[in-house]
Amino acid sequence: MSSRRTGPLLLLLLLTLAAAWPSAPARAGQTADNDPAAALAAARDCGLPAATQDRLLAAGLEGRLAQADILAVLETFTRACGQGLPTRPLADKLDEGLAKRVPGPRLVAALAGLTGDLAWCRDLLVRLRRAPDAAPAPGDVTRLAQSLAAGLDRPTLEDFLTQAPAAPPAMLARAGAVLALMRQAGFDPERCHALLDAGLARGSLGPGWERLSAVALLARQRGLADDAVLDAARNALEQGHTLRRLMEDLGFTPRDVERGGARP
Amino acid sequence: MNAPDPTPRPDERPTPDELLARALRRAEDPPAPPDLTRRVMDRIAALPRPAARAGRWRGLLRWALAPRPVRLAPVHAALGLAAAALLLAGVWLLRPAAPGPAPAAPAVAARFVLPDPAGRARSVAVVGSFNQWDAHGYDMRYDPAAKAWVLILRLAPGTHEYAFLVDGERVEPDPAARFSRDDGFGSRNSLLLLDGDGDVI
């Protein structure tokens, strides 16, 4: 929806909200946080994309979201921003929820849950950093939170990263993401911990290793034993090799591995 | 008007022209001298050679500047204009890009497939993190031979979440996806892992 079309729609929504608002005496106990226009402005200042704002307001005009839900969404977004959390994943989740036509309360709950995960992951990475100035980047916090969405629970993730060799936040976040998918694929957790520890200690767990789970799964489908695959991966990481080298060692070519559910 | 009868009438004396015409008709064609060709070629070779380069270029210039009529069918003119327009468009599109930030890793082709043997769905689209979950422009095509909805996209390397939007209202994960994430709304998103080197993995 273009900005030119949604400008009048935004004004109409604000006027509607203002007309439906209680009279002055009833508003005496309310705070500025309930001001829709102020909430929108605050969210925009925190990086809420214009297109996402348009979709949110359109959902309100279509009656899919109640006024209270819209305000709650905006408040969650702004609060996360105030806590120094990355807001991009929240905007993405909001886009997703609006596209999926999720009911308002569930949308609010999902955003609140994601905010909680982001805060927890950020605090964990801060505790594990090697230097005070090694602040986790927003992408690292987001990637670690995605490992929770992929099935890792907080205690397991915390135990793994706390006991793992010290490493930069980006590599720790990558290890968490890989661990989540390896466990999702059913590989032995302890052996997965060991190979990831080897990669963290060597500093060889680069971005290319994020697809280790797909390679390991294909190796299993080809009849290779899980132990052999995990041992080969550990050896490769200890040697500082790339995932492509592991694939060659396992006898694969890049075209052998299918990408998730989408095929070439 | 008929030619004059050459036969003189008894009472007329032939004119000098008539006498000449009779003589020419009766005369035999004399044979050409045997060395006529050689003598003519020798005379030609003896003629002064013109300034070839100046003459050639002058001749070309005269040719280029001389107006001449051109006949062209309208359809041929239209085809010519279309070809010229295509050529210009190709030159413009292939022009060197302005310098900017370093190019990202090359996009990787990914094929999305949703089996539908019974052909129950009226429409299917792919929504995901790569298109802000907006289905517009991401409609899948039903392949009758495969009995499935298919769409090929070129995406940046990395990990993408996606799902299928069926009939514009129902969101379904990819039944063939090996990895997924909780979407926070009570369902799961499928994961697509694309190799960062731009190769299929």
Image (cartoon, helix red, strand yellow):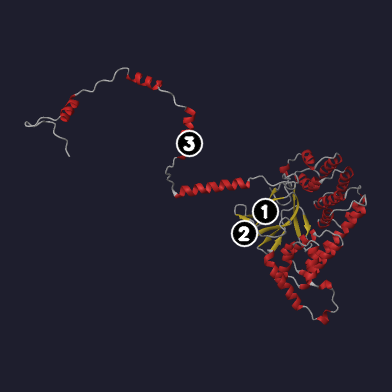
Residue at (68, 63) in percent of width and height: A2
**Mark before the other along the chain sequence, 2 or 1:** 1
- Residue situated in front as seen by the camera: B159 or A17: A17
Is residue B54 depicted above or below A59 in this figure?
Answer: above
**Residue indicated by mark 3:** B61
Three-letter code for the amino acid on which mark 3 is drawn: Leu
Three-letter code for the amino acid on which mark 1 is drawn: Val
3D distance between C-alphas at marks 2 and 1: 13 Å
- Select label 2 or label 1 by which is in front: 1
**Residue indicated by mark 1:** B113
Task: Please state if B157 lies on the left or on the right of B35 as rendered.
Answer: right
Please identify the quadrant where the N terminus of chain A is shown.
bottom right
Circle 1: is it few (<14), some (14-19), or many (20+) Cα within 10 Å?
many
Q: How many marks?
A: 3
Please report contact status of discs 3 and 2: CB closer than 8 Å, yes or no: no
3D distance between C-alphas at marks 3 and 2: 71 Å
- Residue situated in front as seen by the camera: B110 or A20: A20
